[in-house]
Amino acid sequence: MATQVRVAVVEVMAHARPQHGQRAVLPMQLRGASFIQQVMEQVKKDLEANEKTKKDWDSVQRSTERLKDQSRRHEEQMRRAGSAFHGVSSGASENLTSFKDRAVAAATSA
């Protein structure tokens, strides 16, 4: 991401060279991305500096992984249940259609 931002800045600067006495103006998006990048780097430094925060962050990441695993398991269970319901629904539909056909046949032959 940082490399993409740098490439974008270089491209913008190459096409928007300031005239004599003018300052180069970066688009808002590039300035915002740079600011966000700086904030994220500062947060990372702060996390690494504070031991309690570091432990809390590790705990959050473990919890996140645990939630992702549970989500994957539940997704698989829901897929299996959906397949089972689909099979039951198809079977019930076939049985009802067969019953209707027999009833119509019995009514027309009587």
Image: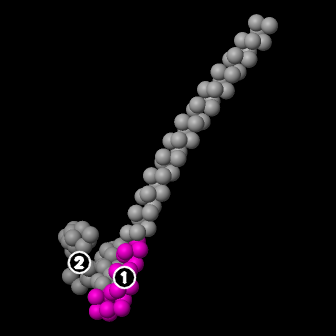
Query: Badge 2 local density, few (<14 within 10 Å), some, or many (20+)?
Result: few
- What range is drawn magenta here? 46-64
Tag 1: amino acid: Trp
Q: Quick check: can you spot residue 35?
A: no
Residue 78 on the magenta segment: no
Give x and y (percent) for residue 61: 37, 75
Which residue is at a point 54% across and 36% down the rendered structure image?
Answer: 87
Which residue is at a point 24% across and 73% down the rendered structure image?
Answer: 2
Q: In which quarter of the view is residue 73 placed?
A: bottom left
List the residue tagged with mark 1.
57
Q: In which quarter of the view is residue 71 placed?
A: bottom left
Of the residues under marks 2 and 1, which one precedes in the sequence?
2
Q: Nearer the viewer, residue 102 or 36?
A: 102
Q: In which quarter of the view is residue 13 placed?
A: bottom left
Figure quadrant of the N terminus: bottom left
List the residue tagged with mark 2.
18
Residue 63 on the magenta segment: yes
Give x and y (percent) for residue 88: 58, 36
Give x and y (percent) for residue 106: 75, 12
